C-alpha cells in the first residue's frame, strides 16, 4: 500500500506510475456491469460527445451517434462499487506519500467513468488537467483504473514523461489550452510521448500537470475507465471556483 523510494522518485521525475493488477477481477467486473447498466439507462449526470464537441464528434444530439456518452459523471455517488474503489487504502496510501499529507477526494473534477465508444468516441488533444482546475498548487493526483484492456488501438492514454515540470509559453497553447500541434517546440515535446497500455485492473497514477492525450477507439467494444482526482488537505480550491463547488471527501487516516 506504499511507494518505495524508487517509485516516489520516479513519480516526481516522470509524473506518472503504473500499478499492475491493483484492482481485482471481481471488482472490475462489478464496475463494468454497473457501467453497462447506467450507459444503457442514460442515467444522469453524464456528458455526451456531441455536447463536448471535440473534433469528429456528432454535430448534435439528434445526429447519428449524437447520444454517444463520453462519461458518467459523479461516480462517487452513483454506486457503492465506485465509492469503495475511490476510498481504497491502496490509493489513499500512495497518494498520501505523493502529496506529503492527508489526501482528500475531489468531487468537482474527474469523479467519473470515462467511456470511449467505437465510431463516435473522439480523440482528446494534448492537455494538462490543471488547465481548468483551480487550486493553490498544481499538485493533484489522478488515479485512472482500466476496467478492460487499453491499447493504442482503442484509445489508451498517451503521456509525455516529465512534462509536469516544464513551463509552457502561452503561444504554444490554443484557446482551450491544448498544445498546438503545428508549433515546432510542441512537436519536439510530443515526440517524447509514450503510450500507457493497461490491462484490466491496472491503475495509472498521474500528476495534474502532466500533458496527456488519447486517440479514437478503433476497436469494436466500449472502453471503460474509472477516474478520480485527489488533493492534499492544504491544497485548497479557489474560493468561489468550480473546483470548490462540489466539495470533497476526507479519506480515512493512515493506518498505524
Image (cartoon, rainbow, N blue to C red):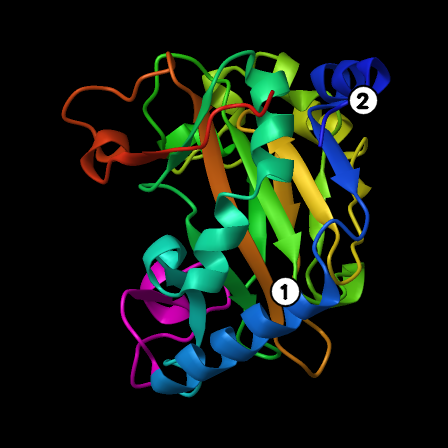
The foreground one among 78 and 70 is 78
| Mark 1 crowd level (few <14, some 14–19, many ≥20, 10 Å Cα) | some
Q: Name the chief secondary structure element in magenta.
A: loop
Looking at the rendering, which quadrant does residue 134 occupy? top left
Q: Residue 175 appears in which quarter of the rendering?
A: top left
What residue is at 71 percent from the left and 30 percent from the top? 16
Rendered view: 239 above or below 252: above
| Residue 19, image x, y percentages | 78, 42
Compute the Cα span from label 2 to label 1: 25 Å
Residue at horizontal 23 percent and vertical 40 percent from the top: 246
Please say if 90 is above or below 188: below
Which residue has dot 1 on it? Answer: 27
- Residue 182 shows in the view: no
- When the figure is inspected, residue 109 is found, relative to residue 121, above or below; the finding is above
Pointers 2 and 1 in contact (C-beta within 8 Å): no
Asked whether residue 59 is drawn in magenta, I would say yes
* Screen quadrant of the N terminus: top right
SS under mark 1 = helix
Q: Residue furthest toward the right?
A: 6
- Frontmost residue, 248 versus 81: 81
Q: Give the image location of residue 209, x and y in percent.
A: 55, 24
- Residue under numbered circle 2: 7
Whichever of callouts 2 and 1 sits on the residue coming sooner in the sequence is 2
Tell me what residue is drawn at x 47 percent, y 37 percent.
229
The magenta-colored residue range is 42-63
Q: Position of residue 53 (x, y in %)?
A: 38, 61
Q: In which quadrant will I find the C terminus?
A: top right
Q: Secondary structure at mark 2?
A: helix
Amino acid at each position: 500500500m506504499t511507494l518505495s523510494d524508487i517509485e516516489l522518485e520516479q513519480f516526481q521525475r516522470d509524473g506518472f506510475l503504473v500499478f499492475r493488477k491493483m484492482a481485482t477481477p471481481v471488482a472490475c467486473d462489478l464496475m463494468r456491469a454497473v457501467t453497462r447498466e447506467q450507459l444503457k439507462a442514460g442515467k444522469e449526470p453524464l456528458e455526451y460527445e456531441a455536447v463536448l464537441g471535440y473534433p469528429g464528434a456528432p454535430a448534435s444530439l439528434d445526429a447519428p451517434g449524437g447520444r454517444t456518452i463520453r462519461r458518467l459523471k459523479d461516480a462517487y455517488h452513483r454506486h457503492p462499487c465506485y465509492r469503495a474503489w475511490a476510498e481504497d487504502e491502496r490509493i489513499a496510501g500512495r497518494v498520501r506519500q505523493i502529496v506529503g499529507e492527508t489526501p482528500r477526494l475531489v468531487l468537482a473534477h474527474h469523479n467519473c467513468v470515462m467511456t470511449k465508444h467505437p465510431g463516435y468516441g473522439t480523440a482528446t488533444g494534448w492537455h494538462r488537467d490543471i488547465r481548468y482546475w483551480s487550486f493553490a498548487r498544481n499538485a493533484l493526483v489522478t488515479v485512472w483504473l482500466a476496467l478492460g484492456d487499453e491499447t493504442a488501438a482503442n484509445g489508451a492514454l498517451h503521456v509525455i514523461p516529465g512534462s509536469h515540470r516544464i513551463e509552457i509559453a502561452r503561444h504554444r497553447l490554443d484557446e482551450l489550452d491544448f498544445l498546438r500541434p503545428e508549433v515546432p517546440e510542441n512537436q519536439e515535446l510530443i515526440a517524447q510521448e509514450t503510450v500507457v497500455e493497461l490491462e484490466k485492473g491496472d491503475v495509472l497514477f498521474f500528476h495534474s500537470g502532466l500533458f496527456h492525450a488519447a486517440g479514437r477507439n478503433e476497436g469494436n467494444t466500449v472502453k471503460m475507465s474509472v477516474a478520480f482526482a485527489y488533493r492534499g488537505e492544504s491544497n485548497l480550491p479557489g474560493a468561489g471556483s468550480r473546483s470548490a463547488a462540489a466539495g470533497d471527501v476526507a479519506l480515512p487516516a493512515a493506518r498505524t
